[in-house]
Image (spheres, helix red, strand yellow):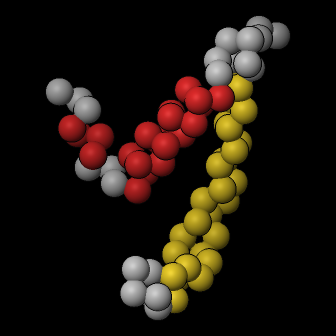
Amino acid sequence: MAPEAAIVAIGKTQWLPRFDEHGAVQRRAILTVTWAGDHRFIDGGTIARFCNAWKGFLEAPESMLLHLA
C-alpha cells in the first residue's frame, strides 16, 4: 500500500440546536469532519487552511465560482 499524505473522515449530518446572531435557537445541519496528515509531507497549518477553505465552499457553494476564473 502506498503512503498517504492526508486522510479525511466524514461523519453523518446531524440536526442540532445552534444559536443565531440574535441569540435565538435554530435547527442546523452539522457535519463532523476529521482531517489527519503525515507531518513528514505536510504541516498542520496547511491542513488547517485547506479545511477552512473546504468548509467555506460547503457553506457557500457559489463562492467556488470565484475561484474557477
Residue 3 to residue 30: above or below: above
- Please give the count of numbered marks on the rendered protein: 0
30 left or right of 8 in image = left
Figure quadrant of residue 7: top right
Q: Position of residue 37 (x, y in %)?
A: 71, 26
30 left or right of 59 in image = right
Q: Position of residue 15 (x, y in %)?
A: 60, 76
Residue at the extreme right: 1
Q: Residue at x 64, y 18 (%)?
A: 42
Residue 35 to residue 20: above or below: above
Q: Position of residue 40 (x, y in %)?
A: 74, 11
Q: Which quadrant would the C terminus be assigned to in this image?
A: top left
Q: Residue at x 34, y 54 (%)?
A: 60
Q: Which quadrant would the N terminus be assigned to in this image?
A: top right
Q: Residue at x 23, y 39 (%)?
A: 65
1 left or right of 50 in image = right
Q: Position of residue 24 (x, y in %)?
A: 46, 91
52 left or right of 48 in image = left
